[in-house]
Image (cartoon, rainbow, N blue to C red):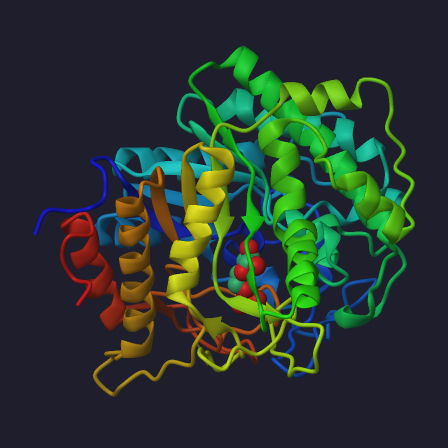
Amino acid sequence: MASAFPDGFLWGGATAANQLEGGWDAGGRGPSVDDHFLGGTVDTPRMITLGIDPTRFYPNHDGIDFYHRYKEDIALFAEMGFNVFRMSIAWSRIFPNGDDAEPNEAGLAFYDKVFDELVGRGIQPLVTLSHYEMPYHLVEKYNGWESRELIALFERYAKTVIDRYHDRVKLWITFNEINLGAYDMGNLFETSMIRGFEGPASEAYTTAQQRYQALHHQFVASGRVIRYGHATYPDLRFANMDCFILTYPMTCDPAGVLLNEREMRTRNWYCSDVQVRGAYPSYARRLWEEEGVELAIADGDLDDIAAGTIDFYTFSYYMSNVVSTHEHEDTKGNMTTGGVNPYLESTDWGWQIDPDGLRFSLNEIYDRYQIPLMVVENGMGALDTVEEDGSIHDDYRIGYLRRHVAAMREAVADGVDLMGYTWWGPIDLVSAGTGEMRKRYGFIYVDKHDDGSGDYSRLRKDSFFAYQRIIKSNGADGLE
Ligand code: BG6
C-alpha cells in the first residue's frame, strides 16, 4: 500500500533532559527545579523539598542515565529507524545557576557529543530549549518566570546554545507545553514559580495574575530568541509547543457549548494564537478582566512578540476531555482534569484514549493557522511485565500507537500539512507528573524501579519492532 505520509516525514521519539539524562551533578551541572521533586503515584502527589535531603530518593537525579549511555540509546533509536529525535537541553548544564558570567564548557561539550552521535546516525535533533526546568537558583532569586529578569537570562542561554549547535540542530522549540502555564497545576512545571515552597506539588498554587504575567514574559523571551535565530541563521526553524487537550461539550446545551469555547481558548488557543500570529487574540482583554489580571507590558514587548512568530506548530496529544455546565464525573490527568467521556476507554492512569480526537485536533489546528504541524508527543503510560526470557509483550501500547498513527494518516488525507511524529518516551523514563518509573512509555525497557533499584539495562519490547515496521514503510504498513 502506498503511504499516505509525505516523503521525508519525520519519525522518532521525544524526551526531556530532566526525565532522561541523570548525571544531575556531573560535569559542573547546577541543581535544577526537578532535582527538588520526590516520587509520587497516581493518587499521591510528588513532594517538593526546599533543600536536597540525602536520605530521600529523587528520581530525576539519575533519570535513566542517558548522560552515560547516550551512545547505546541512540544506536537503539537508529535501529528502530528514527530520522528525528526530540530532546531538551538542561539549562543548568549550560548555566549552572542561570545567571553565571560564563557558560559551563563541560555542559556544552556533552551536547556536542550527543548531537554528533545523532547526526552521524542520520537522526535530526529537534531541540526544546526549556522543558519543565530551570536552574533552581533562579527560583530562589526570582521566583521563576514571574520575574522579567528571566527574559534576558533565557535569551542569553538560548543564544549560547543556538550559536554553538546551529550547524547540527535546525529545528528548535522554545518552551515545552507553554499553555500549561495558564493552568493552576501545570504552571508549577512550566513556569517554576515555587520560591520558598515545600510540600505536595498539588498545593503549590499561584494566582492568575502571576500565571498570565509569567506567560507574557515567556512570549517575549520566545519572540526575542526566534527573532535572533531567524536573523542570524536563516536555515533554522522554530516552533511553539502546546499541550493540546481537546475538550468536547458533553451535551448540546448552549451554555455548555459556550463554556467549552472558553475552555478551548484559555487552555488550547491562547498561547498559540500569540505565537503564531504575533499578537494577543481578540478575546484576551475580556479573559484578563474576568481573571482579575492586569498585565504589565513594557515598551518593545509587543514588537518582540510580533517579530518572533513561529515557523511550525508542535503539540503533545495524549487524551481528550469533556466540559459541561451539568453535573459530571472528573477524570485524572497529570496536571489537568476534565470530564469523563463515556465513549472512551482510559489508561491505568486515567487518561482517556481518543485517536479520533487527534484527527479532529489536527484539522482544527491546521484550519486555524495554515502552517506545518508536528505531533511531538503522543504515548501511553502503562505497567509492563518482563517475561523470564526478557521479552515484553506490550500489545496495549502497540494498539495505542497504531490507532494514533492511523488517525494522523486520515488527517493528512484530510489535507493537513503534517511534518512528523515523535512518540513520547521511546525509552522508559521518569514520569513528569508522578515521578514514577513504573508508568512506562517506552519501546525500550529500562531496568530502573521506583525504589531506585535496577541496573539500568535496556531491553527491546514488542512495540520496538511494531514501530520499526511502521517507520520502515513510512506509515503504509503495520497499522492493522
Ligand atoms: C507531557 C510532558 O505533559 O507529558 C512530558 O511534556 C511528560 O514531560 C508527558 O512526561 C507524560 O506525562 P507523565 O506525567 O505521564 O510523565
Q: Quadrant of ligand 1?
A: bottom right
Left-right relation of 360 to 414: right
Q: Residue at x 62, y 67 (%)?
A: 433
Q: Quadrant for the C terminus, please.
A: bottom left
Figure disc tally: 0
In the rendered image of this protein, does residue 140 appear above or below residue 478? above
In the rendered image of this protein, does residue 101 appear above or below residue 346? above
Direction left: furthest residue = 1
Q: Quadrant of residue 355?
A: bottom left
Which x, y percent locates residue 262? 70, 55
Camera-nearest residue between 27 and 113: 113
Left-right relation of 43 to 207: left
Q: Quadrant of residue 114?
A: top left
Which x, y percent locates residue 31? 71, 51
Camera-nearest residue between 88 and 176: 176
Q: Residue at x 86, y 52 (%)?
A: 291
In the rendered image of this protein, does residue 385 appear above or below residue 461? below
Direction top: furthest residue = 231
Which x, y percent locates residue 426? 37, 59
Which x, y percent locates residue 128? 53, 40
Camera-nearest residue between 293 and 462: 293
Asked whether residue 225 appears in the rendered view, the answer is yes
Asked whether residue 32 appears in the rendered view, the answer is no
In the rendered image of this protein, does residue 194 appear above or below residue 27? below
Q: Residue at x 69, y 26 (%)?
A: 155
